[in-house]
Image: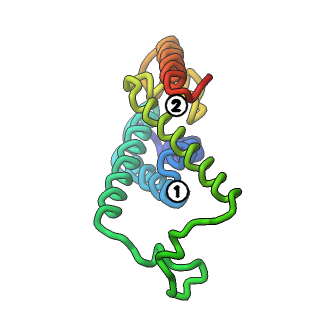
Amino acid sequence: MATEQELSDFLKSVEKRAFKRTVYHVRDEDAALDIVQDSMMKLAEHYGDKPPAELPLLFQRILSNSTLDWFRRQKTRNALFSNMSDFESPDGDGDFDLLEAFAGASDSQQIESAEDSTRRAEILREIELQIQALPNRQREAFLMRYWEEMDVAETAAAMGCSEGSVKTHCSRAVQALAKALRARGILP
């Protein structure tokens, strides 16, 4: 069973990687911080008595589920509510014109940056879809190794498999992603 110090050390060791991963998913630093903190609290409250070797995988599962819960809440909230305050001017005087807010910019540099931003968002969305399409073990190994920057031994321990399996899963994931992204014209 994990001691308080072991649990604390584990949480300190995964804090930054978990935050980076969550920011990548939700694209909102405040929400990501809340999700990571809630995940850490759930781990401490419900699984603090587990052996230290089980904590990485438990935490990854809790973090994934908390992130999915956040997306579900956002989808529901966005479907039900449209806040008129979202359209207010930055100075917050409460006076806004909807047509002016949606008129768009007239100079070409802003239009190009909006186009680049949209293209980048589409590419990221496609990459995320391709990552989601990977088999579970490949996706898990890929995210732990390349997004969370865990080494092979840490990933193997968290996944409960051999280091060779981690390398195989990662290699297959990279090959599948490269093939899919080339087919969609994202990679040369």
Residue at the location (64% across, 65% down)? 106
Q: Which mark is residue 28?
A: 1
- Residue 150 location, x and y as percent? 58, 30
Is the residue marked by circle 1 packed among few (<14), some (14-19), or many (20+) residues within 10 Å?
few
Q: Amino acid at mark 1?
A: Asp
Secondary element under disc 2, as helix, strand or loop, is helix
Relative horizontal placement of residue 170, taking residue 135 as reference (left or right): right
* Distance Cα–Cα, label 1 vs label 2: 20 Å
User: Is the residue marked by circle 2 packed among few (<14), some (14-19), or many (20+) residues within 10 Å?
Assistant: many
Q: What kind of residue is marked 2?
A: Met
Who is closer to the viewer here, 185 or 17? 185
Front residue of this view, candidates 176 and 141: 176
Front one among 79 and 36: 79
Compared to 145, does 121 lie above or below? below
Corner quadrant of residue 35: bottom left
Q: What residue appears at the point 44 percent right and 22 percent down from the top-left corner?
A: 138
Residue 58 in the image: above or below residue 152: below
The spot of residue 119 in percent (x, y) is: 57, 43
Q: Which quadrant is the N terminus positioned in?
A: top left
Give the image location of residue 163, x and y in percent.
52, 15
Rendered residue at 55%/48% (across/down): 118
| Residue 5 shows up from this direction | no
Kindly identify the residue that appears in the image at 53 percent across and 41 percent down. Answer: 10
Residue 171 visible in the displayed image: yes
User: From the image, which quarter does the C terminus lie in?
Assistant: top right
Callout 1–callout 2 Cβ contact below 8 Å:
no
Q: Secondary structure at mark 1?
A: loop
Report the front residue among 43 and 166: 166
Which mark, by number, is residue 144?
Answer: 2
